[in-house]
Amino acid sequence: MESVVEFINGIIWSKALIFLCLAAGLFFSVRTRFMQLRGFFEMCRLTVQGEKSDAGVSSFQALAMSMAGRMGIGNIAGVATAIAFGGPGAIFWMWVMGFLGASTSYVECTLAQIYKTKDAEGRYRGGPAYYIEKAMGLKWYALAFAMATIVAAGFLMPGVQANAIADSIINACRGGALCGPLDGQFMGMESVQALKLGIGIVVALLLGVVIFGGVKRIANFAEVVVPFMAAGFILMAIVIMILNYDRVPDMFRTVFSSAFGAHAAFGAMMGLAVEWGVKRGIYANEAGQGTGPHAAAASEVSHPAKQGYVQAFAIYFDTMMVCTATAFLILAAGTYNVYSPVPGAEPVFAGLAGVAEGAGYAQAAVETVLPGWGSGFVAIAIFFFAFTTIMAYYYMAETNLSYINHNRKRPLTVLALRLGIIGMVIFGAFHNAKMAWALGDIGVGLMAWLNIVAILIVQKPALIALRDYERQKKLGLDPTFDPDALGIKNADFWRQRKLEPSRSE
């Protein structure tokens, strides 16, 4: 089973996908005239502005929902894994992916707004499946993406998050902060396995409470939790950097020299630095993956480009703030290993001998500041990061199920999805981390292939919307969207909205 999963993962995550992600980001940056630089202050302004209605959520709530998906275990364990297999230089390429990915995110999320619709309950729905069908006219391609997303977000990717929650709690328990030593057996199982199963069941029950409450509950929960958990984690990283201030200059030199093959120890790993930086960068910020557009479509805005700006900001925040905080936390404390690309060889760097790649690196770093409690702090952060991500995954899967159901009410299919994702949370928590990550990588890669190819083909409406938005801003207007005036076809929601003169903007 594991060999089959690894074989499929190797095909999907070939160097072709790495190149496609970087090339698409560069292409969209040029096509938007580097809107991620020109429009940075506009991104910040729009992030805290906006309306909400019975059908949609505010721009900030949509940002929080998408950030709930982006800010998962990839921000902690993913960053640590990138360092372990790609060296410190992987962090530089993660930054590159974040910068270029902001323009990719603008395009995909603006398209989601342009081609969004309403489901049977009057809620906004949208995403790649919707814009693939309406802009490309390829129903089969749209169905393929919808099915891939249901499988990936509903069954493959949640296991990574649940597994990370369980492993981080196990690490904290072994440190003695949250519970005693994990020796002996419980109900016929090793104590560790029994605890992981129990953690999976608890997380699954909590998830059930939230997802059975619907999209509004997801948005409200994310709006409160996401800023809190991000701020706390970033603050801890800053504290560790201050306490290790003497290592900071050398840390920056190591990152940049490793990224370009100039470092004495890590120089030979430049190719791996690019590969792992891009791979884990996409897992963390999801630019181009096609996940962010689902939350973007749920936002109540007067112009699609507004949500495009907001979601581009999400990439910056996720990569430049949260992922960077994790990287600096680990590198400043020196609590990491870097494996040799030669199988069986000694590690290139062993700062934390005997500890597997992943959240344990961050937990060891925080332990240097909070002895006995650092692992527990990171375990709590991971719980919130991962739990909100699982919620976002459910919303993505539900949106694509709604697309397949033609936005009609089919409660049995929704119930099956809910029970399925709850079951996979338990399975993922209990199973080994290697299998969980491999399955998650397959899900991420499959969605990225389908979505990036699609937005390269149907980019034009998003670029037209950007020019229209900037034109109206120069005139001192609060931009509104008229697809007919811009020559954009099949934007049915916006066309209908224009015909509702009684609606207050």
Image: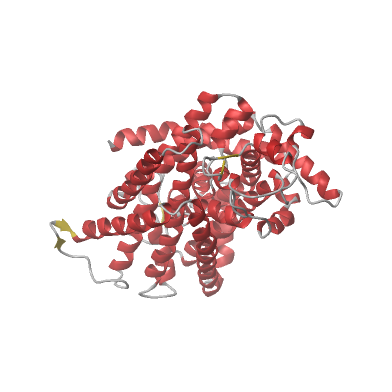
Residue at position x 38%, y 68% from top?
A: 375
Extreme residue toward the front, this view: 502
Of the pair 138 and 78, the residue shown nearer to us: 138
Residue 439 in sight from this viewpoint: no
Extreme residue toward the left, this view: 188
When asked about the image quadrant of residue 252, the answer is: bottom right
Quadrant location of the N terminus in the rendered image: top left
Residue 47, position in %: x, y?
Answer: 66, 57
When asked about the image quadrant of residue 42, the answer is: bottom right
Q: Is residue 302 above or below residue 177?
A: above
Left or right of 335: which side holds 430?
left
Residue at position x 46%, y 39% from top?
A: 409
Residue 253 in sight from this viewpoint: yes
Residue 177, position in %: x, y?
Answer: 32, 73
Of the pair 377 and 267, the residue shown nearer to us: 377
When asked about the image quadrant of residue 443, the answer is: top left
Residue 123, position in %: x, y?
Answer: 55, 45
Q: Is residue 469 above or below residue 364?
A: above
How many numbered circles does the render carry?
0
Residue 100, position in %: x, y?
Answer: 64, 44
Colouring chosen for the image of the structure: secondary structure
